[in-house]
Amino acid sequence: MATPINIDKMATFCKQKGFIYPSSEIYGGISGFFDYGPLGSELKNNIKQAWWKFHVQDREDIVGIDGSIITHPKVWVASGHVENFEDVMLECTKCRERYRGDVLIEDMLKIQADGLKADDINKLVKQNNINCPKCKSPLGEAAPFNLMFQTNVGPKAAKDSVAYLRPETAQVMFVDFKYIVENARLKLPFGIAQIGRAFRNEISPRNFLFRCREFEQMEIEYFIHPEKSNDCPFLKSVESHEIFVWSEEMQKKKQKEKKMKIKEALEKGIIKTAWHGYWLATEHKWFISLGADPDKFRIRQHLSEEKSHYALDTWDLEYNFPFGWKELQGMANRTDFDLQQHIKHSKKDLSLFDEQEKKKIVPHVVAEPSQGVDRAFLVMMFDAYNQDPKDKERDWVVLKLNPKIAPIKVGIFPLVNKLEDDAREVYESLKTLFTCQFDRSGAIGRRYARADEIGIPYCVTFDFDSREDKSVTIRDRDSTKQVRVKIEDLKNTLYQLIVGEIEFEKAGKLIKQK
Ligand code: GAP
């Protein structure tokens, strides 16, 4: 069980240990932008690699791309973002502080307000006498605010050179659709995946990495035949998977979320299509495979008034953050909205030929698992953070990151400085396979503590007996147990431990501890 800490404490911990820095802090910082430090960039890369392996490399039905951040501006006209990608802004009439309307309403009235229009927000502000939380003065009229960052392409800043930094990675997958299908010889059902930066000029970025202005997304557009939304060949693999479910009906009736099997949610018509059920369970399973606590997740259906302009049905995978249940991943059924829009605006044929029915079809995106990398990073950190005040032996933080994503997998220590050359030899032999850290400074206990705090799962110590018995000690971060292992077996043993193929106690000769 992780130790609960608030988001500010997590931000401080991340800064102190070199995971995340507020961007350009020496100039006073810039709100909504963050830099990943030495450990943060390793952890973030590991999360992205784990996602790519699970969703692309381990599957036959999904291929990946890496599209450009700036595209032709017509992409965003066709997608509806130029017209619709907006939040409602409230501004204080006195101190000029700006608030995102739905977030302020949620904070003040504790109701679900995502997607409320400016008129509804104005009404709620008046009815409930909501004033500026900062200076208590009246708020001005709510107004829509488009979240896309604009730039100019080329040397002349003119109307016809305006372009946008992408607010989602998704559109490139629709625009390049025809090429990808042909080159990868894809047959329905199939998915296209992408990891990359997205930019949103958020009105009030907050909660550290949770809502930033520059972030990364890991997205899949999963395409199916328009008439086959229940034809999911993988459903069996998730039918008995359990998850907390909070449907639109349950929310409207003020009922709590309920744990159920995917099979039950589909049979009762709570989740409408087999494909949507499959993807919701699969995304939950991905987090669990990396060590996250299954019961801190739930799936919540969007209320009708909350859905994006393109969505038929949307479920969010939510996580119970210290600041409440929040969206971790959006999963919309986008139907053929995007492909049809691009067909209309580009006048290009993006349909596929249905060999069986001998007719053209425009595939549907039955589910779009869309995950923020930075939010996944936060989940891994919150689930890993442990500090037990009752543990007198270990009065420091133990970051119990799953070994698969831990930024540094192995620490290598000489017990005393005169064994440094021998320990270095071990380090040299391991570093080609694992991200390792060599540490010779301070007492061994201090080195273990430093390793625990940054989540190194295994520490290898070269001691006085090592030259004789050609063995070293491996210490397990989570249990502090130690095993003795032959140096010639070390690579293999560490690999098995990291991927979870063996239990620690069976990895070598268990050392009795005092
Ligand atoms: N293509 C669909 C799409 O972009 P979204 O729900 O707007 O849907 C998907 O975004 C995911 O991207 C979210 O669930 C979240 O994890 C992440 N995300 C969105 N806005 C973010 C922000 N301002 N800061 C960090 N992550 C964000």
Image (cartoon, rainbow, N blue to C red):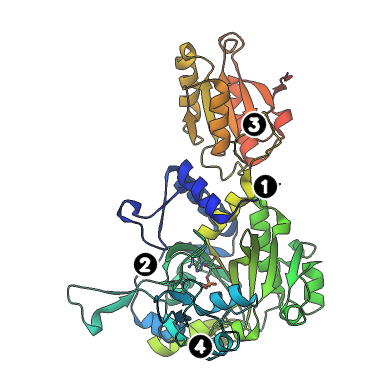
The type of residue carrying mark 2 is: Ser
Helix, strand or loop at mark 1: loop
Residue lying at 33% horizontally and 78% vertically, measured from the top left? 72
Q: Residue furthest top?
A: 468
Mark 2 or mark 1: whose residue is earlier in sequence: 1
Q: CA distance from mark 3 to mark 1?
A: 15 Å
- Badge 4 is on which residue? 118
In the foreground, 374 or 410:
374
Percent of width and height locating residue 290? 63, 50
The type of residue carrying mark 4 is: Ala
Question: Which of the two marks, 1 or 4, is nearer to us in this view?
Answer: 4
Task: Determine whether label 1 and label 4 are within 8 Å by CB.
Answer: no
Residue lying at 77% horizontally and 71% vertically, measured from the top left? 256
Q: Quadrant of residue 488?
A: top right
Mark 3 or mark 1: whose residue is earlier in sequence: 1
- Badge 3 is on which residue? 394
Percent of width and height locating residue 152? 25, 75
The type of residue carrying mark 3 is: Arg
- Badge 1 is on which residue? 2
Above-or-below relation of 210 to 266? above
Q: Is residue 464 left or right of residue 238?
A: left
Q: Residues within 10 Å of mark 2 (few under 14, many from 20)?
A: few
Question: Which of the two marks, 3 or 1, is nearer to us in this view?
Answer: 3
Task: Determine whether label 2 and label 4 are within 8 Å by CB.
Answer: no
Above-or-below relation of 167 to 62? below
Q: CA distance from mark 2 to mark 3?
A: 47 Å
- Badge 2 is on which residue? 68
